[in-house]
Image (tube, rainbow, N blue to C red):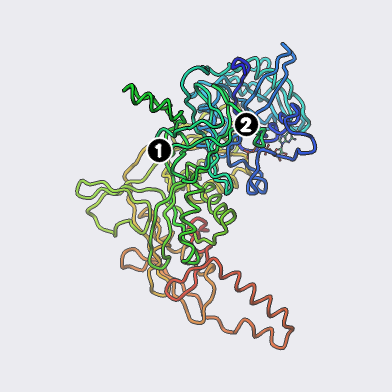
Amino acid sequence: YNADRIRNFSIIAHIDHGKSTLADRILESTETVAARDMSEQLLDNMDIERERGITIKLQAARVLYKSKVDGEIYTLNLIDTPGHVDFSYEVSRSLAGCEGALLVVDASQGIEAQTLANVYLALENNLEIIPVLNKIDLPAADPDRVAQEIEETIGLDCTDIVHASGKSGIGIEDILESIVKTIPPPPANADKPLRALIFDSYYDSYRGIIVFFRVVDGQVKKGDKIRFFKSGAEHAVTEIGVMTPQQVQVDTLRAGEVGYVCGSIKDVLDARVGDTIVLAQDYKDSVAAEDVMEPLPGYADSVPMVYSGLFPVDADDYESLRDACGKLKLNDASFSYEPETSGAMGFGFRCGFLGLLHMEIINERLSREYNLDLIMTAPSVVYKIIHNGEEINVDSPSKFPDLTRDHETLEPYVRMEVLTPSEYNGPVIELGQERRGILIDINYLTPTRSTIVYELPLGEVITDFFDQLKSRTKGYASMEYSIIDYRASDLCRLDVKINYELASALSTVVHVDNARSVGGRLVKSLKNLIPRQMFKVPIQACLGVNVIASESISPMRKDVLAKCYGGDISRKKKLLQKQAKGKKKMKTIGSVTVPQEAFMAVLKLD
Ligand code: GTP
């Protein structure tokens, strides 16, 4: 152990610029992972990550590297981070545990919205930033142009910028050398009392909760009795180790090092991300001496941007859902949940997410990792209602007050920055205007690339804004946003009635001027999404007691099995099975079975 030879760094980049692939090459070239165990995007170990080709979770790995310059062996702790905005809480926690960051930029694309956002995060954390031009193997790579872009927009010196390719392995040694040379070792004092910061954790059914941490001061050994500062829980350490990236046990971890600990911790509330681990004895001594130890600053809590309801299809699964949410929250501190009951939907949870992708991923993890069949309602932002001088937060459209004139409604606004080739400035601005945006600024990064800044309601962003932006710019634009404030808007609740029964899970909040148009499109879309029943089903959009749009689903004429008459039995069986499967994700409202897709209809209106 020599703290001077430790380097803690993150890899940051815009989505798809090649972080995970570059991390693979680093693990491979340092022989951290044997060639036979190597697989693509090794650090993306969740099924969902591999299928979608995106990183969702931060992932730490310890790499030993012998420097060609001084022949010494360095311990490099690498943290691979997600690129998508919805997972920026993972990025901010990773960066807080590092002294440096590799900024990976695709040499054929250049700087994108999340490149900038991640750079700002790194700068806030006082990190040393090493820019890397990646995908240099691509014929379309234009390293000189992109290097100039980095110099001009971020202000990093690019004279000696590393040219790399995660795919063909170019430049990996240069990257490792510049990490050793440029990134400072962690400020570390192994003789002080232990203080370690928890940056991640997950639930393992055999070993209990596994906690990932960085030792800031002091040291921790197997057998030590540790205390989680904020929760006050104490546990004996049964195992500590490092991630290579497989977990490998060690005896001691000292200041500056990164590792994991477990100690038969069963309660998910014991070890929270951001909490400080200390030694139980040190804590006791400090209390006795009336000079109680200070915990580490931890992390700012993540603030959910959108909320939606999650309900088990089968009411008996409610307890399992509660348990699953608790375990998932342990592994994803930006997810939040609270019990919610709704007439037709039964018992469930109101859940908070950082964005739509985050919401989708949580839904998928709950069904896959915990085997739950769930119905999810459309996402909503948090509105503020001011009534008689009192302010209330409303995170569900069904709780939004009826049309009256004696309250004021406010909605969250975001500052959005769009990066696009300048030829698409027109379509981007058109989209911004359609979504009630206020154009703030247009800047030319280079003669052919612009940043367009808008202020617009978050509610307009969480529907299909990103899809629209991509399709109107042929996939070239990228975006990034953050909440700035709440502003007064003329909003109202639009209700849906199915077979004359109020479907509160389908209510949505819209701007008064758009109510008619949204109502009309919503009932049309629902008409196509809700299957025919044995009877005629009217679908109405209402503002208060007024019906503003309606459609009806005509009744089913024939028995679905009729066309199989006399046919072979296996075909009949298949049809019945198909029906049974389709029934899985449905809820009954007004004697009508409503499928999952209908709950999301408001997100994709033509
Ligand atoms: P997120 O974690 O989702 O943000 O993506 P990422 O930045 O980790 O990117 P990833 O490593 O998953 O790579 C994205 C795509 O680019 C994959 O299809 C890779 O095969 C490809 N890719 C990565 N590095 C290179 C490279 O150096 N050259 C070429 N030609 N393709 C690359």
Which one is in front, 17 or 542? 17
Determine contact: label 1, label 2, CB under 8 Å: no
Which one is in front, 452 or 303? 303
Report which quarter residue 71 is drawn in.
top right
**Which residue is labeled 2 in the image?**
242
Quadrant where ligand 1 appears:
top right
In the depicted structure, whether residue 79 falls above or below residue 161: below
Q: In the rendered view of the protein, which quadrant contains the N terminus?
A: top right
- Distance from label 1 to label 2 (Cα)? 24 Å
Tell me residue 316's x, y (percent): 47, 66
Kind of residue at disc 2: Val
Left or right placement of residue 221 versus residue 243 in this view: left
Q: Residue furthest bottom?
A: 566
Q: Which mark is residue 231?
A: 1
User: Within 10 Å of the Cα at label 1, are there few (<14), some (14-19), or many (20+) other Cα atoms?
Assistant: few
Tell me residue 556's x, y (percent): 55, 81
In the depicted structure, whether residue 335 falls above or below residue 213: below
User: Within 10 Å of the Cα at label 2, are there few (<14), some (14-19), or many (20+) other Cα atoms?
Assistant: many
Q: Secondary structure at mark 2?
A: strand
Q: Give the residue at x 37% y 23%.
A: 286
Question: In the rendered image, is residue 2 in sight?
Answer: yes
Q: Secondary structure at mark 1?
A: loop
Q: Which mark is residue 433?
A: none
